[in-house]
Every structure is written in C-alpha cells, then in structure tokens.
Amino acid sequence: MIDRVCEGLEEGEGGRGEIHKLTAAAVFKAAEATSFVLDKAVQIHGGSGYMRDTEVNRLYRTGRVLEVGAGTQEVRKLIISGELLKN
C-alpha cells in the first residue's frame, strides 16, 4: 500500500483525492497492526508489560500515538469513506 501511495503522488495535488484516501488507509492499517501487536506483547509479558520502566510499556504508549497523531482512526475512516463515495 505504501508503494501505491508514493507512486500516486504528483506535484501540486495537495493531498486530496485518491492520494488522500490511500495515505489515510496506509496510516490506518499501520496504526491498527501496531496496536494489535503491542497489545499482544503486553499480554505476553503480563504484569511486567504494564510496568512503566519496561521497553514493552514504552512501545505500547508510543504505538498509541500512531492512532491519535495526525488525526484519529475515526477521522481516517471518514476520509476513506468520503473518497470512496465520491467514486
């Protein structure tokens, strides 16, 4: 998907249309996969996964930023659905 985003980027598009949809979808999928993997990592590590000074906990907190940074997952869904409905 990232390849499609990079290939479709043309100078002057301004992040609208197909490229906007593909970018939102790529970030959405990356954030979703990161959350899934890190949630499992915390579960595997048990109580130590929740301790503030562990690497797993740091990664879990950092991964959550992906879901919120540059718009929430809900906003990304609206962008994707809006672009799909235009076509």
Image: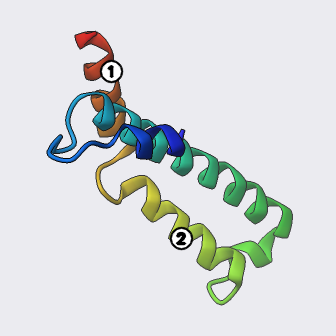
User: Would you call the spot at circle 1 few (<14 residues within 10 Å), some (14-19), or many (20 or more)?
Assistant: few
Q: Secondary structure at mark 2?
A: helix
Q: Is tag 2's residue or tag 1's residue first in the polypeptide sequence? A: 2
Residue at horizontal 83 percent and vertical 70 percent from the top: 45
Q: Is residue 45 left or right of residue 30?
A: right
Q: Position of residue 77 (x, y in %)?
A: 36, 31
Q: Position of residue 43 (x, y in %)?
A: 79, 59
| Residue that label 1 marks | 81
Q: How is the image coloured?
A: rainbow
Judging depth in this view, the residue of 32 and 43 nearest the camera is 32
Q: Which residue appears farthest toward the bottom when viewing the image?
A: 53
User: Would you call the spot at circle 2 few (<14 residues within 10 Å), some (14-19), or many (20 or more)?
Assistant: some
Judging depth in this view, the residue of 25 and 15 nearest the camera is 15
Q: Is residue 60 left or right of residue 18?
A: right
| Label 2 – label 1 distance at C-alpha | 28 Å
Q: Quadrant of the N terminus?
A: top right
Q: Quadrant of the C terminus?
A: top left
Residue at horizontal 32 percent and vertical 36 percent from the top: 19
Q: Position of residue 30 (x, y in %)?
A: 55, 49
Residue 15 lies, with reference to residue 85, above or below; the image says: below
Identified by mark 2, the residue type is Arg
| Residue that label 2 marks | 61
Q: Which mark is residue 54?
A: none
Residue 80 lies, with reference to residue 87, above or below; the image says: below
Q: Secondary structure at mark 1?
A: helix
Residue 75 lies, with reference to residue 50, above or below; the image says: above
Q: Quadrant of residue 65?
A: bottom left
Identified by mark 1, the residue type is Ser
Residue at horizontal 34 percent and vertical 27 percent from the top: 80
Residue at horizontal 27 percent and vertical 21 percent from the top: 83
Q: Nearer the viewer, mark 2 or mark 1?
A: 1
Residue 47 lies, with reference to residue 86, above or below; the image says: below
